[in-house]
Amino acid sequence: MATEIEGHASDLLEALYEAERAGTDEDEAIATYLEQAGLDAASYGFTVVDFLADHGMVERHHGFGKPRGRSTPAGMHAIQKLHVDRANPKIRAAALRTEMITWLDSQEERGTEPTSFQEFADSLESAEDGDSYSERELRGAAEYLQRHQLTESVHVEESSEGWIRPRLTVEGRECITDHAGDVAEYIRERRGGGPTTHHKTTVHISDNNGNLVINGDRFTQITAPVSISPSFSTSRAAFARCCRCSDSRPRRRETLQSWPMTGMPRPVHQRQTVIDCVGWSSGCLSVSTMPPQRSRRRCCSRPEKLRGRQSPAVEHCRSPARGGFRAMCRRAFG
């Protein structure tokens, strides 16, 4: 919110700009503005001109007991920028809403209840700013304030919403106290769910198989389902059961051909398991699986002790000829 001296400095600079464009005396424009604003030219007039000169907007040259000055290129640019902002509908609407809610707060502070926003429009005309906002802009701003629950009013059929007997709500007073009457800032914060609090933290992510969204709003977290193959020991045991004592050789061959397609994972710690021996004896398939690090003698000489162990699983044939089984193991391991 601008201070008093900033407001007078802006208005005086605009008066100097208009005088220069019209080709009239700039010193006379300064005296006229100070007189209309009710300011003492001998004291406050010098203060305002010096304030503009310190900011590079006016080149001062006081004389004969009167404040005198001429606008600089920087001052002319500032006024032209002000005119552009006034012509911008977004800036105009935001400024008007702030002025209206601030005016309501000042009326409430005085203990008066305005009958309508027409009193606000009349105050603009008395300040010679009546051409700043149209009737449509004024009524639109009143409707906007009520729609966002910053004001409340009496509903009248032949009048627009928010125009008759307007008064501030709790939200309107909060906008005044917390945001200095800046309606746009208040609504923007309320739509965003309040102020943002930042926390520093460390996030550890492992085995991420989905989409991770950081600093997102209104998003849906999607995680792709992952199919997990059964453990190696379970797959190997299931294969052994399928191959054990099958009814016919074609069925067993089909099982052997389809085994690599079962998706059986590699053993833990990347150990390679090999089929030690595959043989046919007494109509039964003989399969022995063994890691390469295992002792060849232990596998061949004491296979019955390995029966029932989960790793390695050994399924040997039921043939009474134990020597044939040992020979196949020797050939398998070289």
Image: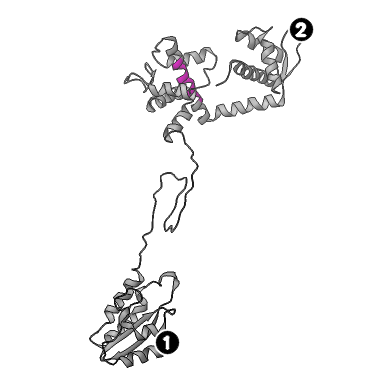
Q: Residue at x 60, y 26 (%)?
A: 82
Q: Which disc, if any, is residue 333?
A: 1
Q: Is residue 92 above or below residue 248?
A: above
Q: Amino acid at mark 2?
A: Phe
Horizontal side, residue 39 vs residue 236: left or right:
right
Is residue 228 in view from this perspective? yes
Q: Which disc, if any, is residue 246?
A: none
Q: How many marks?
A: 2
**Residue 328 position within the rendered picture, expressed as x and y whole percent measured from the top left:** 36, 90
Q: Residue at x 47, y 48 (%)?
A: 214
**Residue 118 position within the rendered picture, expressed as x and y whole percent measured from the top left:** 43, 15
Q: Are marks 1 and 2 in contact (CB under 8 Å)?
A: no
Q: Which disc, if any, is residue 64?
A: 2
Q: Residue at x 51, y 25 (%)?
A: 95
Q: Amino acid at mark 1?
A: Phe
Color style of the picture: one colour
Q: Secondary structure at mark 2?
A: loop
Q: Which residues are magenta?
A: 95-105
Indicate whether residue 98 is drawn in magenta. Answer: yes
Q: Nearer the viewer, residue 314 or 303?
A: 303
Of pointers 1 and 2, the one earlier in the residue sequence: 2
Q: Nearer the viewer, residue 270 or 46?
A: 270
The quadrant the N terminus occupies is top right
Q: Secondary structure at mark 1?
A: helix
Q: Residue at x 43, y 25 (%)?
A: 140
The quadrant the C terminus occupies is bottom left
**Residue 25 position within the rendered picture, expressed as x and y whole percent measured from the top left:** 71, 14
Would you call the spot at circle 1 few (<14 residues within 10 Å), some (14-19), or many (20 or more)? few
Q: Quadrant of residue 237?
A: bottom left
